[in-house]
Image (spheres, grey):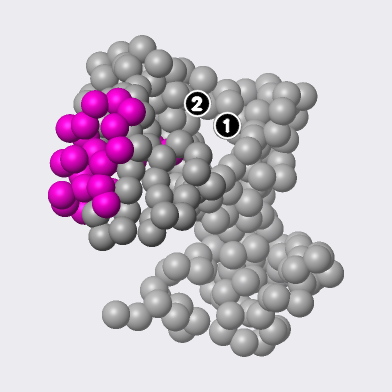
Amino acid sequence: MIAAVVGETPITVEEVDRRVRLLRRGPRGGLLPLEGTTEGRQLRRWVTQILVAERVVAGEAAARGLTPGAGPPLELDATARLELGSVMAAVLSGDRLAQALYRDLTARVTADEAEVRRYYAANQDRYRPRPARLVTHRHEGRPVNGGRWYAVTAGELAEPAARAVFAAPEGAVVGPFGGHTFTTGPFRSPEVPFERAAPGIRAFLLDARRRRHFALWAEARCARAILMPGFEHPGDIRHTDHTHRH
């Protein structure tokens, strides 16, 4: 019996069931839904999507003459997995051929200087936060933070303590304010200049854009697969096991 067809290549029900059995024997097998339940059938559909994605990746890699890469594995954090989707994230996590294809497909994706500057300007809370001042702090005569210097911003202190701490000369003792006394140290500028922030911003934008490029490519290619009844996409609202309702 056939579960799906990718191009002219069938994916059999036996292949799907074999992969499901492999998952059930794995370290998280006890967490998987029971066979015959709505969630169990949805698991089979998800596994079918994994097999479809693997066939799509293998076909494109062969067409490009790619082999499994020897470089470092592709690290996917929670944000990356969300952006890629659970199916493609699962394929990329464990398949070096898929990682080689990912790198090849996204090699020409860029983030130019103007985009980096726009991101820097739009995130001033990250790169130009409020000025801070080093203080030592005592409450009812007892040292706070072990008596060590630490940085505070005006927004972290209640008035009139904030105004006094930021107006006082260095070395002044201000207070008490409700039992709190501060010794003021030097001002600390937390601003991160564009030149220092730019490499990290560029890498962040590139990673996000590459994931989007690959996810859109994979979605379009996988959507061409023919799925048999009972093996529809888990998110397809037309099948009876679809549980997301509004």
Q: Is residue 236 above or below residue 107?
A: below
Q: Residue at x 57, y 23 (%)?
A: 104
Q: Residue at x 41, y 40 (%)?
A: 136
Q: Marks 2 and 1, Cα distance to the nearest angstrom?
A: 6 Å
Q: Residue at x 37, y 33 (%)?
A: 134
Residue 170, by quadrant, is top left
Residue 198 placement (x, y as % from top left): 38, 18
Q: Is residue 145 located in the magenta-colored stretch of the structure?
A: no
The stretch of residues the image draws in magenta is 150-176
The residue singled out by tag 2 in the image is: 106
Q: Is residue 4 above or below residue 212?
A: below
Residue 146 placement (x, y as % from top left): 54, 47
The amino acid sitting under disc 2 is Thr
Q: Can I make out residue 209 in this image?
A: no
Q: Is residue 169 located in the magenta-colored stretch of the structure?
A: yes
Look at the numbered discs 2 and 1 and tell me whether their residues touch, using CB distance below 8 Å: yes
Q: Residue at x 43, y 69 (%)?
A: 236
Mark 2, other Cα within 10 Å: few <14 / some 14–19 / many ≥20? some
Left or right: 238, with 113 as reference point: right
